[in-house]
Amino acid sequence: MSQALLVMLGGALGSVSRWGLTLLIPAPWGVWLINLIGCALLSFLMHPSAPLSSDARLLLGTGVMGGFTTYSTFNHNVLTLLVAGQPGRAAWLAAATFGACLAGGAAGWLLADRVFSAS
């Protein structure tokens, strides 16, 4: 299968998954959760010890996680709060997203350390 097709199929799956989750949890917190999950999963999948082929990394990392997570929507949510005259909420959302996603990425990395070093 071509690499472009792998990325395209993964992107479609990730985008539909993001859309479905935002139906359950509306913005901005659905997007926050999506980015948190995405950071954790991407760190797990891209860990150097993960037994994934380069094609699997393209499908899951670039494709699925690229379609699932979305900085642009997060940015829009923060700007919407700023324009609405809610700078405190905007700052809180930005800080909570950065902190949670950094922690999620670290958790994914540490989990991969344990899972893949046990193999």
Image (spheres, rainbow, N blue to C red):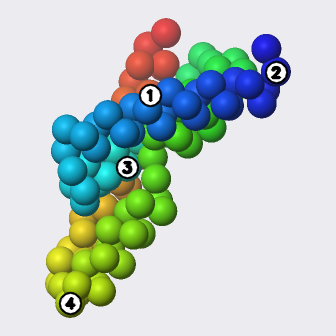
Q: Secondary structure at mark 2?
A: loop
Residue at position x 47%, y 59% in the image:
71
Instruction: For marks 4 and 1, give the CA distance.
Output: 42 Å
Marks 3 and 2: which is nearer the front?
2
**Mark 2 crowd level (few <14, some 14–19, many ≥20, 10 Å Cα):** few
Instruction: For marks 1 and 2, give the CA distance.
Output: 27 Å
Please report whichever mark, 4 or 2, sits nearer to the chain's N-terminal start: 2
Please report whichever mark, 1 or 3, sits nearer to the chain's N-terminal start: 3
Amino acid type shown at disc 3: Asn
Please report whichever mark, 3 or 2, sits nearer to the chain's N-terminal start: 2
Residue at position x 55%, y 31% in the image:
12
Marks 4 and 2: which is nearer the front?
4
Please report whichever mark, 1 or 2, sits nearer to the chain's N-terminal start: 2
Amino acid type shown at disc 2: Ser
**Mark 1 crowd level (few <14, some 14–19, many ≥20, 10 Å Cα):** many
Amino acid type shown at disc 1: Ala
Q: Which residue is mark 2?
A: 2
Residue 86 x/y as whole percent: 18, 85
Residue at position x 21%, y 50% in the image:
26
Residue 70 x/y as whole percent: 46, 53
Q: Is residue 9 above or below residue 110?
A: above
Q: Which mark is residue 112?
A: 1
